[in-house]
Image (tube, helix red, strand yellow):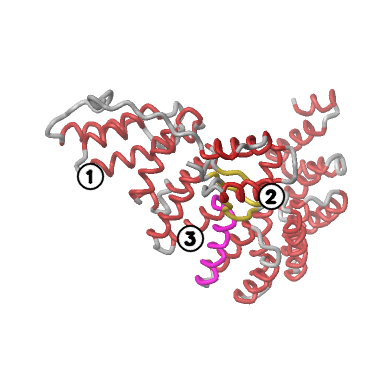
């Protein structure tokens, strides 16, 4: 079918799909077919290199990879060439190729995910070419020369793998201070692996509190609820995570709903073990409400079994939903935000409104919102004017890959 569509449209994407399917059923025959279409598109040429590598035809793969890199020096094309150079027995050449690629990516910072993959493979190629301590020193010299959050994390984890825990902790802590989300989660995982669960809980609580976007909150929850880290047994973290996920129920993805249900089940289990059966029942029922249609490992029976045990153990089985406090006083109207007293310009008002809604934002995000590059000066004037009136409105959290990060702290 893909071949017929390619013949009709000339779109190389369909030819690539056809050749990929061919390689699954007849790898050797597909090699000849790929050779006939060499140069049609970079994607097809890359697939050809991977197929030759999978068949241990590394000399042919290296030749094809070198030709591909000349035509399109994309990061993954250069990386596969470095790996094939290593397979050819030239460890020093592979190290040099990977190092050049790493330095180029560290200088651009356009794609953090690609940078992370390249730095991981660069470490592996270094270890194949040098003794462990020497490889680590070279890795720190290259990656640390242009420090980024991803680079600091990779250095810290590389040092941890070699048992050099002091530098590992220092670099991961620096990553945390640079980017509380990406760096903070890596630092927290390190602390959990080292058994420092008290400090781990503090870091994760900070991540939970300051994750303003739903996707970021789900990312934090995925790490916190990973049984391999042991973080799901940290009571304060579990409690706050369940609260924040439940409050965001309307914007959670299906995966986020499952994470919320897992957090509530864990909280219910803790409450049951502490003899707080009403609390356990309530958490179970809210978790059932959030349970997604297509869940992964979680099952409805997990909640039903815990609910049954709560009812069996409770001396008085009281309803837990729909209870209200009798005679509760009407809430006081909220106080106006402090920036009302500053007589903001329209541009300043947009900046403060965005920060108040999202709680934090990077310099790049604010440039997009305001349509100007002069964000730092605008924030500095606001901070100074607020300080002159004895109030704190905006604070700086640190510098990340997207520039300065600002936090709204007005009450």
Q: Secondary structure at mark 2?
A: helix
Q: Earlier in the sequence, mark 1 or mark 2?
A: 1
Q: Which residues are magenta?
A: 165-182
Q: Which mark is residue 121?
A: none
Q: Is residue 77 visible?
A: yes
Q: Which mark is residue 273?
A: 1
Residue at 22% over, 34% down: 278
Q: Work out how far the residue at label 1 is from the one at label 3, CA to CA, in angstroms.
A: 29 Å
Q: Nearer the viewer, mark 1 or mark 2?
A: 2
Residue at 71% over, 55% down: 56
User: Could you say which is closer to the camera, residue 384 or residue 369?
Assistant: 384
Q: Mark 3 sits on what residue? A: 190
Q: Quadrant of residue 243?
A: top left
Q: Mark 2 sits on what residue? A: 376
Query: Whole-percent x and y of residue 258?
Result: 44, 35
User: Could you say which is closer to the camera, residue 150 or residue 203?
Assistant: 203
Q: How crowded is the residue under tag 1: few (<14 C-alpha within 10 Å), some, or many (20+)? A: few
């Amino acid at each position: 079918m893909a071949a017929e569509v390619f013949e009709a449209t000339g779109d190389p994407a369909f030819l690539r799909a056809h050749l990929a399917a061919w390689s699954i059923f007849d790898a050797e025959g597909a090699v000849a077919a790929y050779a006939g279409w060499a140069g049609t598109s970079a994607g097809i040429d890359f697939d050809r290199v991977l197929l030759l590598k999978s068949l241990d035809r590394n000399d042919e793969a290296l030749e094809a990879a070198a030709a591909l890199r000349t035509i399109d020096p994309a990061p993954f094309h250069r990386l596969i060439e470095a790996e094939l150079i290593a397979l050819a027995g030239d460890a020093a050449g592979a190290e040099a190729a990977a190092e050049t690629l790493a330095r180029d990516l560290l200088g651009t910072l356009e794609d953090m995910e690609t940078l992370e993959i390249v730095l991981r493979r660069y470490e592996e190629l270094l270890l194949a070419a040098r003794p462990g301590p020497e490889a680590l020193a070279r890795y720190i010299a290259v990656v640390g020369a242009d420090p980024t959050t991803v680079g600091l994390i990779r250095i810290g984890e590389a040092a941890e793998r070699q048992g050099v825990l002091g530098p590992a902790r220092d670099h991961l802590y620096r990553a945390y201070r640079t980017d509380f989300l990406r760096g903070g989660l890596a630092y927290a995982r390190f602390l959990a692996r080292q058994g420092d669960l008290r400090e781990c809980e503090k870091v994760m609580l900070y991540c939970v509190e300051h994750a303003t976007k739903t996707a970021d909150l789900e990312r934090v929850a995925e790490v916190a609820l990973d049984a391999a880290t042991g973080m799901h047994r940290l009571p304060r973290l579990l409690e706050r995570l369940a609260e924040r996920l439940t409050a965001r129920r309307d914007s959670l993805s299906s995966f986020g709903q499952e994470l919320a249900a897992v957090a509530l089940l864990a909280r219910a289990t803790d409450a049951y073990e502490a003899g707080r059966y009403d609390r356990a029942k309530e958490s179970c029922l809210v978790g059932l409400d959030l349970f997604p249609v297509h869940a992964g490992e979680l099952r409805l029976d997990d909640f039903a079994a815990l609910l049954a045990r709560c009812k069996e153990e409770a001396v008085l089985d009281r309803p837990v939903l729909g209870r209200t406090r009798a005679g509760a006083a009407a809430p006081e109207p909220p106080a106006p935000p402090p920036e009302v007293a500053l007589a903001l310009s329209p541009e300043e008002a947009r900046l403060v409104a965005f920060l108040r809604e999202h709680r934090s934002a990077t310099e790049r995000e604010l440039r997009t919102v305001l349509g100007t590059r002069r964000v730092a000066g605008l924030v500095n004037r606001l901070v100074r004017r607020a300080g002159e009136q004895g109030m704190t409105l905006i604070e700086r959290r640190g510098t990340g890959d997207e520039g300065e990060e600002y936090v709204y702290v007005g009450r």
